[in-house]
Amino acid sequence: MKSARPDSQGHFGPYGGIFVPETLMEPLRELTRVYKVAQKDPAFKKELDYYLREYVGRPSPLWFAQRMTAQLGGPKIYLKREDLNHTGAHKINNVVGQALLARRLGKTRLIAETGAGQHGVATATAAALFGMECTVYMGKVDMERQALNVFRMESLGAKVVAVTAGQQTLKEAINEAMRDWVSNLRNTHYVLGTAFGPHPYPMIVRDFQSVIGKEARKQILKAEGRLPAAVIACVGGGSNAIGIFSAFIKDEGVRLIGVEAGGLGIVPGKHAARFAGGKVGVLQGTKSYVLQDDDGQILLTHSVSAGLDYASVGPEHAMLHDTGRAEYTYIEDADAVAGFDQLAQWEGILPALESSHAIAWVVKNAGQFAKNDIVIINVSGRGDKDVQQIAEWKKGQSTK
């Protein structure tokens, strides 16, 4: 099975599509046209590769986690170090690509939504790099738990707008960013941060993030001379996961394992595990699995990780789930925090709380693998942004 190309309307099987107001149809068509031209333009690829190499710092290392491997008694664990990218996460891969597209579109202003703040930081960074105006929408709750990233965005010259509607997290931030885009189409490009939303965004974001998987595949073959038994990544909207999965989809012997946010358990309103508690629906421009009630109302979500705290998931992940090519599971908050501590103490690496879900899954399920099996964990971001929140979470647990 090969990595899928969506049809002309952006469908991955029954998922995806374009569910937006008429005013956004032409901007999306224009973005699709410009992207298709850029894909075939050697000059665009050369420019993108230049910025990824010289500015972002790619390729990111594939680190053999010797102490983690020894602690768990196997399998052989490798970490794809997206946390070492400039700005501290995988988000910059997509943002640089979209900023270059925005220049081709003649846009002078970038807008973005952000949950954990890493996409907002990446967008603010690219705007500064290319001399563009930048506005980032962020839920008020997320701003409070990611105050460091708010300061970083503002230091980079971005305007950070607090969203106070609804749950005051990522879903509401996307709503506000789309309202801004509708009102400012002439000069503004919406840098959607994950493999979600209306076509062509799931395709574009997947393609820009596929650099992760291409590098990891080449690196593991060089290091071990064989493919891994499994590739594991956390899944919020799903960009870091689809980015690393994409290079291994055709390798049927490689398990692709996506780890969602189990929050406080699979109880409505207490988690963000769409495949464990959701059903098919339409949200924010695309058709996928959605956490909703029987009347189609979007449920509240919860995760200790702001970046995974979202009610839906990218449409390509929905297709991979239904075809059985990828497996989707979840990790609860307490185990994710434990995963953060374990990687820090075993390898001297502070993973983002998002990535800690993938770490924790391997810790809990290492026994599924033979001692000589290889697994790759995508460390999608670094945990500096989360240390204050983790400290507060631990304090709260100690008083219970």
Image (cartoon, rainbow, N blue to C red):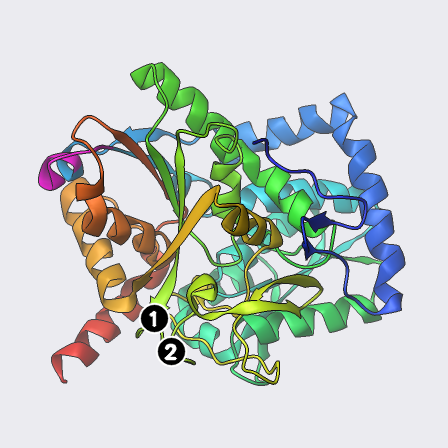
Residue 291 at x, y percent in the picture: 52, 73
Q: Nearer the viewer, residue 342 or 298?
A: 298
Element type where label 2 sits in the image: loop
Mark before the other along the chain sequence, 2 or 1: 1
Q: Would you place residue 357 above or below residue 270 in this image?
A: above
Q: Does 391 sit left or right of 291 as displayed?
A: left
Residue 122 forms part of the magenta stretch: no
Q: Are marks 2 and 1 in contact (CB under 8 Å)?
A: yes
Instruction: Give the alpha-carbon distance from disc 2 to disc 1, as whole Å.
Output: 6 Å
Residue 371 at x, y percent in the picture: 16, 30
Find disc 1 in the rendering and name its residue.
Answer: 263
Q: Nearer the viewer, residue 317 or 30?
A: 317
Residue 161 visible at all: no
Residue that appears at 14% across and 48% down = 345
Question: Residue 297, located in which quarter of the rendered image?
Answer: bottom right
Q: Nearer the viewer, residue 137 or 331?
A: 331
Find disc 2 in the rendering and name its residue.
Answer: 270
Which range is magenta? Answer: 69-76
Residue 317 visible at all: yes
Residue that appears at 83% across and 71% down = 183
Residue 169 at x, y percent in the picture: 51, 75
